[in-house]
């Protein structure tokens, strides 16, 4: 029987169903971060070295080239490293690092040592599920050499895949020249 009450009930159920599914937030629907500045903070294990190195591109892609500080390290040492991300396109600037840490399950840092650089980078942290995150790492230098380190912040990577370093989208990708001398 098709009464007005049944039609109203059916309409109400449909609206309720849409409201429930429309308000559902998928964990992977977060937006990519706006990042104009990346800072690598390196501290030697013995405390003798404590420096920050900056990659800065305040006008973003397509404008002026970024300014990049060269990283100079001592051979045969260990350094604790932490990476910080900022959006300096706004005033005041926004430290995006805290948001990235809070969403560690949805982010992954990937490091590529390029050239003949004698450097090993080892993760020292994980996300909330015990999977790779790599905001904090240990850099171990070998003999004198030079090259660069490319740091990529990936957004929504699939951390269950064996090639997780190539999944998700790119929030930021920077490259620092490095000398071990």
Image (spheres, rainbow, N blue to C red):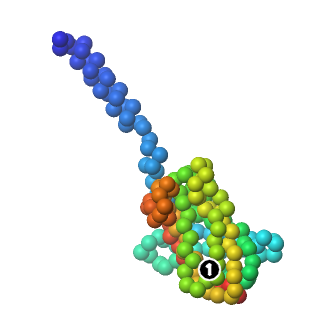
Q: Residue at horizontal 52%, vertical 64%? A: 153
Q: Residue at horizontal 39%, vertical 31%? A: 20
- Asked if residue 149 is positioned above or below residue 109 in the image, the reply reads below
Q: Position of residue 42 (x, y in %)?
A: 70, 71
> Horizontally, is 160 left or right of 71 in the view?
left
Q: What is the crowding at mark 1: few (fewer than 14 residues within 10 Å), some, or many (at least 20)?
A: some
Number of labelled discs? 1
- Asked if residue 57 is positioned above or below residue 30 in the image, the reply reads below
Q: Residue at horizontal 45%, vertical 61%? A: 167
Seen from the viewer's position, the closer of residues 93 and 77 is: 77
Q: Quadrant of residue 47?
A: bottom right
Q: Position of residue 174 (x, y in %)?
A: 53, 73
Q: Quadrant of the C terminus?
A: bottom right
- Asked if residue 128 is positioned above or below residue 22 in the image, the reply reads below
Q: Quadrant of residue 38?
A: bottom right
Q: Position of residue 113 (x, y in %)?
A: 57, 77
Q: Position of residue 88 (x, y in %)?
A: 55, 65
Whether residue 130 appears in this view of the structure is yes
Whether residue 102 appears in this view of the structure is no
- Asked if residue 149 is positioned above or below residue 17 in the image, the reply reads below
- The residue sitting at the front extreme is 162
> Horizontally, is 8 left or right of 168 in the view?
left
Callout 1: helix, strand or loop? Answer: loop
Seen from the viewer's position, the closer of residues 109 and 57 is: 109
Q: Quadrant of the N terminus?
A: top left
What residue is disc 1 on? 69
Q: Residue at horizontal 61%, vertical 83%? A: 117
């Amino acid at each position: 029987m098709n009464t007005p009450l049944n039609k109203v009930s059916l309409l109400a159920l449909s609206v309720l169903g849409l409201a429930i599914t429309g308000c559902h937030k998928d964990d992977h629907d977060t937006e990519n971060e706006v990042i104009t500045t990346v800072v690598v903070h390196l501290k030697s294990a013995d405390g003798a070295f404590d420096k920050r190195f900056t990659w800065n591109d305040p006008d973003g892609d397509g404008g002026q080239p970024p300014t990049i500080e060269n990283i100079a390290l001592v051979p045969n040492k260990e350094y604790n490293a932490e990476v910080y991300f900022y959006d300096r396109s706004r005033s005041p600037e926004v430290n995006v690092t805290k948001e990235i840490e809070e969403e560690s399950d949805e982010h992954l840092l990937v490091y590529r040592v390029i050239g003949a650089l004698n450097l090993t980078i080892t993760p020292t942290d994980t996300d909330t599920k015990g999977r790779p995150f790599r905001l904090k790492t240990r850099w171990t230098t070998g003999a004198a050499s030079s090259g660069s380190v490319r740091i990529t912040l990936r957004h929504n990577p699939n951390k269950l895949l064996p090639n997780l370093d190539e999944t998700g989208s790119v929030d930021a990708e920077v490259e620092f020249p490095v000398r071990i001398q």
